[in-house]
Every structure is written in structure tokens, then in C-alpha cells.
Image (spheres, rainbow, N blue to C red):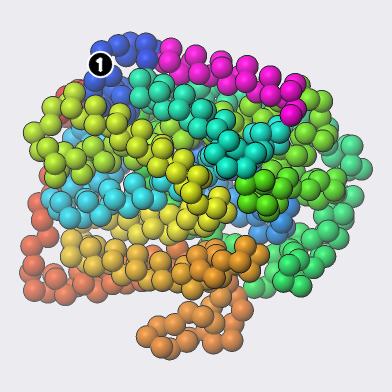
Amino acid sequence: MQWTELVVFSALFLLVTVLGFVASRWKNAGSSLDHLDEWGLGGRKFGSWITWFMVGGDLYTAYTFVAVPALIFGAGALGFYALPYTVIVYPLVFLPLLRMWSVSRVHGYVTTADFVRGRYGSRTLAFLVAITGIVATMPYIALQLVGLEAVLRTMGLNAGGLLGHLPLLIAFLILALYTYQSGLRAPALIAFVKDGLIYVVILVAAIYLPSKFGGWGHIFDSASDALAKPGANGKPKGSIFLTGSNQLQYATLALGSALALFLYPHMQTGILASKSRKVIKKNMMALPIYSVLLGVLAMLGYIALTSGAKPIVNHATGKPDSNTIFPVLFDQQFPSWFAGIAFAAIGIGALVPAAIMSIGAANLWTRNIYKEYVNRGATPAQEAKQAKLASLVVKFGAVAFILFIDPQFSIDLQLIGGVMILQTLPAVAVALYTRWLHIRGLVIGWFVGMGWGLYLLYTIPNPATNHAHFGGSALTLEKLSLLGWHPFGGSQTQIYVGVVALAANAVVAVVVTVIAHAFKVSNGLDRTHPADYHAEDGSPNVKPIAVH
């Protein structure tokens, strides 16, 4: 047991717990939390600073802080895909997010599925978008637990069985309670602490560690030598340079991840909670600052290779847990009190996104499944109550992933989640600009993209983890088959499955749309108007908060 680290970690965890409960009275919440606008979107009145910390705390998660260095440690340059992905995402989503915010404020939409329902008048299409968002979010929340458990394991809480998971269960029970009480205000307030700690920890590490290990030149040379050593399959574990076979995978993974991020419920929840389009514009310009932090963080994977750090063996599985490499590095190279601060930053970094993700999924359940199919006459108070209960189910469903499924498999499930959420892009992002795509094309395209994407993921093995299926998201082009035809036979170049599945989705949607238009098939009722997509805060057509 690392008692100093554990005491510092516990003290900071207690601080954010208090903040989580206090948040129920922050920004004049009170009894208004019995409305989904208030509980699930923070009253839609977060300003620039709150939005910046909250969205940053939501997108740069605990798993980011353990997985990116771990991927660099294990594979080298390929792990840097997270850097261009977080650079290009903001220019890509700048205008779509503004349009989504405006049309949502005019019509009182809480979720992307609300928008799809209003844009096309289709319950089926809205249901597909909602269920995709919920299912894709579950393993994403589970991965926050993976990051938190990596920290707990490094501090000595590494028992097997239920006892080994007990600290995690206690942490998420506390998270569930203050999220239930305070809604989105809790992670928004805690994000200030989380982001502040992360910045301090990473900047200190970026200055101190390179000087300790002989400078970046020596670090790169040592990391290159370590990655060149053969892994379990007899081949080099990785390289500090991209190779001919993984350059396309790197580019498509970065692009696909950027597109997927816009579609995740937690991204939309953070944006719709902003009080104006101006707030969103400022944040799309300022959030790339986090990418600088992420780049420094990724380099710590090379420092871990140079230092000789080794992952801790998970006593529950008997296998080394690669996710512990970042905490182990800090445990070995810094005083215990500072390592405790770093561990608290990662642990709190799990709570903020997990809370926002569970709220985003709960909003989808409440507005697009419960109210649409179970209780069409639900009052605002009933909606809020349902969302609170759903957020508990989602959180503890994520805990079940960790308790009953190998954590490595939950990582594979997150890759599946990214492929799944991409299949909603035509119905959500494209629909923000045009209704040309037909409802039937969007529905059939969703099924084709989803089915083919999951099939391709099923065919990918992972020898390192002994998984015959769902072993990753990188597809070798020679295995790409179109009704038995292999257009890239013999090619060892890899590509991200999500982009392949999305391309199939889009082609089918376009073809079916052309046929539907030719036969003049009805394309549903559009309840939105062109002016709705440019409405500013204070415009006469903007609906007052907490009124539906």
C-alpha cells in the first residue's frame, strides 16, 4: 500500500465529492432540477469558462491520460493518432455545432435524436439514433473505470475478486449519488479542479522528466531500440515512425474519431448546455489548447520506455495491465505526495466524463424512448425523474462491464462503439444542412453500415490478447471483400473499420434516396425552418428555458 499517495488521493477525492453535492445549489438550481433542461443541461446557461472546463474535462478523459501513453509505450507512433484527431475535430464541427445549438434552442431539443425526430418526423430513425448513442456510450463509461482502476492498482489496491473492485464500486456509488442530485452542474463544477490538476501534473512532468533521462534525443533513441525488440508474435512491438502498412490506418482513425466525437451524446450535452452561439465559437477556438497537453502526455509513453517501467500485474486476471504504465512512471519518478496528486487528477478525470456520458445517455433514454414509446404524456418532473434513474442504470451497467468482462475486452467494445456512432452521421450531421437524403435511405443505410461494420470487427483477431474476434479496429485491405470480390488482394495496408462502414452506409443511403425520390415516396414532415439554424440567444423564436 502506498499510504502517502492514497491519503492525498482520498483528500482530493473528498473535495470533489463535496463539490458534487454543493453543485445542486449552484447557479440557482434548487427545485428547478425537476426539469430536464435544468438537470440534464444545466439550465442551458453555462458561459465560456464553465463550458471550456466542462467540455475539456469531458473530451479529455481519464482513459485518455492512461491509454495514450500506454499505446505509445506498446506500439509507438501509431498512438499519436489522438493528436491530429483532437486538432482537426474543432474546425470540422465548428459550424455543425452552431447549427445544432440554434435549432435545439428554438425547439427545446435535448438530444440529437430529438433533432432527427423534428427534422424528419420519423420515430424509427430517431429511435435508431437514440439506441446507438446509448449503446456506444456504455463501454466509453466503462473505460473511465479502467483508468481509475489503473490508479487504484498502482497505489496498492490490487486484490482479486470483488474485494479488488470494492474501492471502484465505492467511488462510483458516490459519483452516482451526487450526479443524481445535482445533474450536469456536478461535473461542470468538478471539471475546474480536474483540469487544474491535470495541467499542473503534465507540465511538471514535461519539464522534469526529459532532463532526468538525458534529453529528448536520448529518449527517442532508447524508445526506438525498445520498440524494435520482438513482441509476443515475434515481430517488432512498434516503431517511433509510421510504417507503410499503418499510415492509412493512422489517417482514417484520426478522421473517423474526429467525426465520431461530434456524434457522441456527451459532446452534444456539453454544447447544448452553453448559453449562446458566441460561447461555442470561443470554445471551438480555445479547446485546441488541450491538444498541446495531449501531445506532451503522449511523449510520456516514450519516457516510460526509456525508464524501464513495467506494467503492474492485475491480480484479478494474472496479466500485466498496460494501462498502469503512466501511474507506474509517476510512482517511480516523483515523490509520493506529487504522485498522489497525479493519481487524483486521473481519478477525478474519470468522474467528470463518466457523469456527463451517463447524463447524455439518460437524456436519450428519457426523451426518445421513454417519452416516445412508454409515457407520451410525461410531465417535465416525470422526465427529470426518469433521467435521474436512467443515469444510475447506465453507471452501474458500466461497472458491470468491469466486474464481469475482462477490462481489455471493454476496450475492444469501445472500438465497436466508435464504429457504431459513426453510422448516425448521415441522419444527424448531414441533416443539419439538407433533407435530400430520404428517411428510408437513412434507415437502410444505418442497417447496412452497422451490420457490415460489426461483421468486419468480428473478423479482426488480436493475438496479443488471444482474442479471435473483435480484437481491434484496424482492417487489412486484403481482407476487404465486396460480395466475394477482393479489390485489394495482397495489400497489407490497414484502414479504420469505421470509415469503411460509414462509406457503405452513405452509398446505400444515396442509392435508396435516388430511388425513393424517383418514385415520389414521402420523406416525412420537417418541423424546422431555415431561420432556426441561425437563431441567436435572445432571438424572439428561441424557446424559454425549461418550457416545452
Report the side of 547 relative to 182 (left or right). left
Among the 4 quarters of the image, the one containing residue 498? bottom left
Which span of residues is magenta-colored?
A: 1-23
Among the 4 quarters of the image, the one containing residue 33? top left
Q: State whether residue 505 is above or below residue 326.
A: below
**Badge 1: residue crowd in 10 Å (few <14, some 14–19, many ≥20):** some
Quarter of the picture containing the C terminus is top left
Task: Identify which residue, 179 or 39, lies in the foreground.
Answer: 179
Q: Can residue 87 be seen at all in this image of the molecule? A: yes
Q: State whether residue 182 is above or below residue 468.
A: above
Report the side of 185 relative to 411 (left or right). left
Disc 1: which residue: 32
Number of numbered labels in the structure image = 1
Residue 501 on image: x %, y %:
40, 68
The residue positioned 34% from the left and 68% from the top of the image is 451
Report the side of 375 relative to 431 (left or right). left
View extreme (right): residue: 214
Quarter of the picture containing the N terminus is top right
Q: Can residue 539 be seen at all in this image of the molecule? A: no
Tell whether position 470 is magenta: no
Residue 116 on image: x %, y %:
22, 49
Q: Amino acid at mark 1?
A: Ser
Dominant secondary structure of the residues highlighted in magenta in the image = helix
Residue 392 on image: x %, y %:
36, 33
